[in-house]
Amino acid sequence: MPLKNIVSLVFVVLMLATWTLSGAASSTSDRKLYKWVDEQGVTHYGDHVPPEYASQEQHIVNSQGVETDHIDAQKTADQLAAEEQKRQDAETRANRDKNLLNTYVSVSEIERLRDQRLELLADQIKVTGQFLEILNGRLKKLQLASMRFKPYSGDPNAPPMSDQLAEDLVHVGNDIRTQEENLREKRNEESTMTKQFDSDIARFKELRVSH
């Protein structure tokens, strides 16, 4: 056994022996002996923990050497953040379970609501797609018309493009990009909604079994 450990062990034995002898004259039930480990891995005992080890895990023993209490090491900011996130996740799951049980009475009811919402999204996707077709057709006509003017015409005598035609090209192009983004968002929403309802149905089945 390393010399440091031997010295530490002798110290605690002597301290416990002192407490035992003094116990005949007074109660030692309120006496505390702290146990901690230093950076070298050596275990120490004492009536208080040095400040540099105050944030570490500590054990409290009585006059018989029996552990009576335990103090966890202080948590780091990352550990505290992880625990808080875990708590929030658990709270979110509990609220979700409560809402599922309070909102629905059967799986078919969830499926019916799912179908209604997906149908509404499908209609919105269809309308957006049709509008895009119209815009693309309009853009093609504008582009064809622009070929008669500079700078798109190959005729050196071609007149310059009118401001109105140029504005229409820019405007329609912007509308197409906007509707394409809308279409992507609707399709993503459709996919997310489908997954969410599938998850809700699976969880609802689990909850009904457990309840």
Image (spheres, helix red, strand yellow):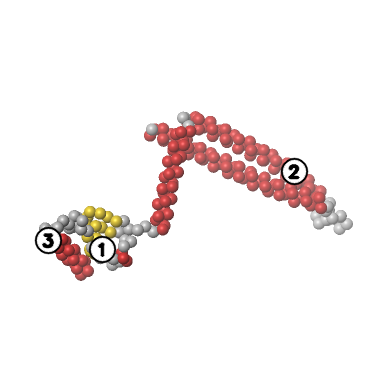
Q: Is disc 2 surrounded by few (<14), some (14 to 19) or many (20+) residues within 10 Å?
A: few
Measured as percent of width and height from the top left, residue 209 is found at: 39, 33
Amino acid type of the residue tagged 3 in the rendering: Leu
Q: Quadrant of the C terminus?
A: top left
Amino acid type of the residue tagged 1 in the rendering: His
Amino acid type of the residue tagged 2 in the rendering: Gly
Residue with the mark numbered 1: 48
Q: Is residue 202 visible?
A: no
Q: Earlier in the sequence, mark 3 or mark 1?
A: 3
Q: CA distance from mark 2 to mark 3?
A: 101 Å
Label 2: state its secondary structure: helix
Residue at the spot 75% in from the left edge and 43% down from the top edge: 137
Residue with the mark numbered 2: 137
Q: Is residue 104 visible?
A: yes
Please, which residue is most extreme toward the right here? 157
Label 1: state its secondary structure: loop
Residue 21 is marked as 3
Q: Earlier in the sequence, mark 2 or mark 1?
A: 1
Q: Is disc 1 surrounded by few (<14), some (14 to 19) or many (20+) residues within 10 Å?
A: few
Residue at the spot 63% in from the left edge and 43% down from the top edge: 183
Residues at discs 2 and 3 in contact (Cβ within 8 Å): no
Measured as percent of width and height from the top left, residue 104 is found at: 48, 32
The image quadrant that residue 15 belongs to is: bottom left
| Rendered position, 78 above or below 108 | below
